[in-house]
Amino acid sequence: MNLELRHLRVVCAIAETGSVTKAASMLGLAQPALTAQLQRIERALGGPLFDRDRRGARPTALGELVLDRARMLLPAMKGLQDEAARLAGSADPLTRYRFGGVNSPILGRLVHRLAAERPDVQISTYASWSVDELAQLVAGGRLDFALTGVCGDAAPSAEFGLSWREVAVDPIFVLLPQTHRMAGRDEVRLVDLRHEQWVAAPGEGCFGDCFAAACARAGFTPRKLYEADVRGCLDLVDAGEAVGLCQATFRPVAGLVTRRLAGTPLRWRLLLGWHPDAPTARVAETVLETAVAAYTDALAPHPDYLAWLLGRPDFGAQVAAAGGVRTA
């Protein structure tokens, strides 16, 4: 058997987790299949790579040698693949826009505007709940732009070297059934919802912690916080099982209403990210301007929110005040 990069990833996964069983789970493989693969790798290399017992798997001297080489080779190969992907798209980067989005309120309007302005450009989209996954795909040249949201003053991971710019900042609203006792108010105090159960779309950032902290500042501990996709959130709120947390530009279905939370205890920052060395970085400012225009389009069905934004420069579109590109 010839040794391949995937075999080195197996060895690294076992060393990282300290267990063949845990490594199999991390790699999405059945434990017997990974054990058989490890045995083939060990035969190819001429000896055992791990001492294995009830306490886990520990590298042998041969295993340490292989791990040292693997930890140099795998990042180098990853870098080569990323550079090759970016170079492969450099021949004519302006004929293709590839967007990734995390629960973005403007992705559809952004695509619509770009398609109208540049009918010659191919536009594709990719959805993920993981900001890190999207950032990794952009860094690797597999996506051109990421549209993501972060809570409060948080920032995406700096690990992937992307440039991030704010498109807009919005307060978090609460989603209520039309029959809810608070539905008739323009804004609702968070503390007045202390007896409710909650639901929000999933994510990997700090939103859950920020929400818990906002409730603590209001003097209570929130009851259960469900996670569900957008349709599931709507169903739970409509059923009266929970109240929802949503973005200010969210347009609910019949029977549901959105209301501001008094004092804006939670903020959501919409960001556009790209890799500064990618060919499409040359059009990033244009795409950013189009994203801001798409955000403005999203405000049109919300005249009350538009009126609230007047005189509040810390909210709404932020690109005019953003200054230079900030690498996060």
Image (spheres, helix red, strand yellow):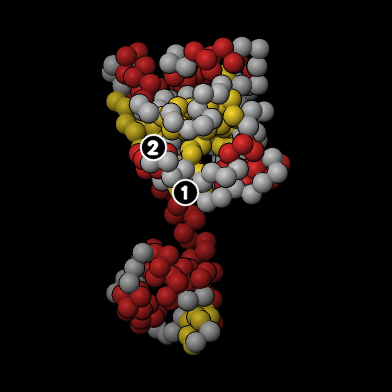
Between the C-alphas of marks 2 and 1, the distance is 14 Å
Give the number of the mark in front: 2 or 1: 2
Give the labeled residue for mark 2. 238
Query: Quick one: SS at disc 2?
Result: helix
Q: What residue type is labelled 1?
A: Tyr
Q: In terms of secondary structure, where does tag 1 sit?
A: strand
Q: How busy is the neighbourhood of tag 2: few (under 14 within 10 Å), some, or many (20 plus)?
A: many
Give the labeled residue for mark 1: 226
Figure label count: 2
Please report the residue visible at 40 percent of the width from the left and 68 percent of the height from the top. 25
Q: Which of marks 2 and 1 is nearer the N terminus?
A: 1
Q: Residue furthest bottom?
A: 53
Name the quadrant containing residue 196.
top right
**Residue 250 position within the rendered picture, expressed as x and y whole percent measured from the top left:** 45, 27
- Residue at image coords 28%, 16%: 119
Q: What residue type is labelled 2?
A: Asp
Q: Is residue 172 left or right of residue 23?
A: right
Image quadrant holding the N terminus, namely bottom left
**Left or right for 151, reference 77:** right
